[in-house]
């Protein structure tokens, strides 16, 4: 069976009424798109499985857009095959192209394959991104076993058990996301993606390491901060204020490179992002993403945030320019420094815990002192003061 509930501000009430229909196969997407999919000749005879395969893939590309902050990115053929199967993946991709969702595009050199690999580059079309007639799509359960994979060796068993058992209170999380969407004038596509991540936690449980960095990724990595406030476990969280900007200082110190004292002071005081207020009328989260995109994880001198950075911190800017011209991946360097700290934070007394990049979540209040001390010691060894935020 396929249940379709038109999306509205009161959708959570509908979900409560029909809670027996909430399965691991819950999605949010455009109702017209679903109708068009079902109106076509599908690559396999089982309509429910074909729709599930497509909706799973669309969830993947939604997350990819958020991760890359771009609608154009390479996708390995093996990844596409994992959704659609080796015998049918080309038919599925042709259907998605026909429906104006995604299509292959060439690289700058005109080729359709990345040199040395079989990575085809794809562009997700605006017609898909800007859809507005949303609905909750629920497919009934099947005999498929719950998927859980852990690719990280020597990981504390409590971490693994937490990711396996943790759940999101879906009604509360969706209600909170709708309110956040209204309060912050977000795009409808952003709300769709944030809700999609909530449903994803019901469907896929995993723990894995990054391909080029030592970060630990898991099913709750992409869950928004708003949704994380509605987990079914009462967890304390500790995170570092201005963590990535401070890690840049750590990197520069370790490599005997210059930086501005004003940069260090702003980061230590937790005021770094505030120095960029007023640009494009962005809020703090948008400022943070733009700085990562145009300064730390890429270097775009013509960008407004990059120009402001140069005005505020000229010595640090020169160091970043040098790093960029040297071909060093600053993103990988900073993320590995981050992992060096957070991957080794082990709460002694907590039964449940997990890390989330520059934060750690755990359930025993008696672990706070030791965790905060470990974080501060990591930075103090490099002569850096750090502020931490503790959430309950």
Image (cartoon, rainbow, N blue to C red):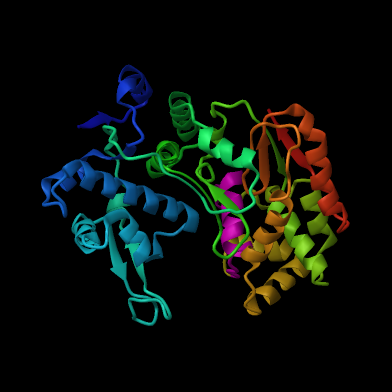
Query: Residue shown at 28%/35% (left/top)?
Result: 142
Stretch of the chain drawn in magenta? 279-301
| Camera-nearest residue between 143 and 331 | 143
Residue 279 seen from this side: no
Tell me which corner region of the image, top left, top right, bottom left or bottom right, holds residue 84: bottom left
Tell me which corner region of the image, top left, top right, bottom left or bottom right, holds residue 119: bottom left
Image coordinates of residue 198 in percent, x first then y, are: 44, 36
| Camera-nearest residue between 322 and 122 | 122
In the rendered structure, the answer to whether residue 56 lies left or right of residue 331 reads left
Magenta span: predominant SS is: helix
Residue 120 seen from this side: yes
Q: In this rendering, is residue 93 above or below 186?
A: below
Q: Residue furthest top?
A: 17
Q: In this rendering, is residue 303 above or below 208?
A: below
Magenta stretch: includes residue 361: no
Tell me which corner region of the image, top left, top right, bottom left or bottom right, holds residue 360: top right
Image coordinates of residue 18 in percent, x first then y, are: 30, 20
Q: Quadrant of the C terminus?
A: top right
Query: Residue shown at 50%/31% (left/top)?
Result: 167
Query: Residue shown at 51%/41% (left/top)?
Result: 223
Q: Quadrant of the N terminus?
A: top left
| Camera-nearest residue between 193 and 337 | 337
Count up the numbered dots.
0
Query: Residue shown at 20%/62% (left/top)?
Result: 94
Image coordinates of residue 276 in percent, x first then y, are: 66, 52
Image coordinates of residue 299 in percent, x first then y, are: 60, 69
Magenta stretch: includes residue 282: yes
């Amino acid at each position: 069976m396929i249940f379709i509930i038109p999306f509205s501000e009161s959708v959570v009430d509908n979900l409560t009424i029909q809670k027996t229909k909430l399965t691991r196969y819950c999605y949010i997407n455009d109702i017209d798109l679903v109708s068009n999919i079902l109106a076509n000749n599908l690559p396999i005879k089982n309509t429910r499985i074909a729709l599930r395969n497509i909706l799973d893939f669309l969830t993947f590309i939604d997350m990819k857009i958020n991760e890359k902050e771009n609608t154009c990115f390479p996708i390995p053929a093996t990844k596409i095959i994992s959704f659609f199967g080796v015998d049918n993946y080309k038919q599925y991709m042709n259907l998605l192209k026909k429906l104006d969702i995604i299509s292959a595009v060439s690289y700058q050199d005109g080729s359709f394959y990345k040199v040395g690999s079989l990575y085809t580059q794809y562009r997700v079309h605006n017609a898909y991104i800007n859809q507005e007639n949303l609905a909750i799509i629920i497919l009934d359960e099947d005999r498929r076993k719950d998927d859980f994979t852990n690719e990280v060796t020597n990981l504390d068993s409590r971490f693994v058990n937490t990711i396996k058992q943790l759940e999101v209170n879906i009604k509360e999380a969706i209600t909170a996301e709708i309110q956040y969407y209204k309060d912050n004038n977000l795009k409808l596509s952003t709300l769709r993606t944030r809700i999609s991540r909530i449903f994803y936690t019901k469907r896929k449980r995993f723990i894995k390491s990054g391909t080029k960095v030592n970060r630990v990724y898991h099913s709750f990595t992409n869950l928004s901060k708003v949704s994380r406030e509605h987990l079914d476990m009462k967890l304390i969280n500790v995170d570092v204020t201005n963590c990535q900007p401070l890690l840049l200082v750590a990197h520069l110190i370790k490599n005997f490179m210059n930086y501005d004292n004003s940069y260090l002071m702003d980061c230590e005081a937790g005021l770094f992002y505030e120095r960029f207020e007023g640009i494009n009328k962005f809020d703090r989260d948008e400022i943070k993403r733009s700085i990562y995109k145009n300064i730390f994880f890429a270097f775009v001198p013509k960008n407004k945030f990059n120009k402001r950075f140069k005005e505020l911190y000229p010595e640090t800017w020169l160091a970043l320019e040098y790093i960029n011209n040297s071909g060093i991946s600053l993103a990988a360097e900073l993320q590995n420094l981050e992992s060096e700290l957070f991957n080794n934070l082990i709460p002694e007394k907590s039964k449940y815990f997990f890390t989330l990049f520059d934060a750690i979540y755990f359930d025993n209040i008696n672990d706070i002192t030791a965790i905060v001390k470990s974080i501060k010691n990591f930075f103090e060894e490099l002569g850096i003061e750090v502020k931490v935020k503790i959430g309950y």
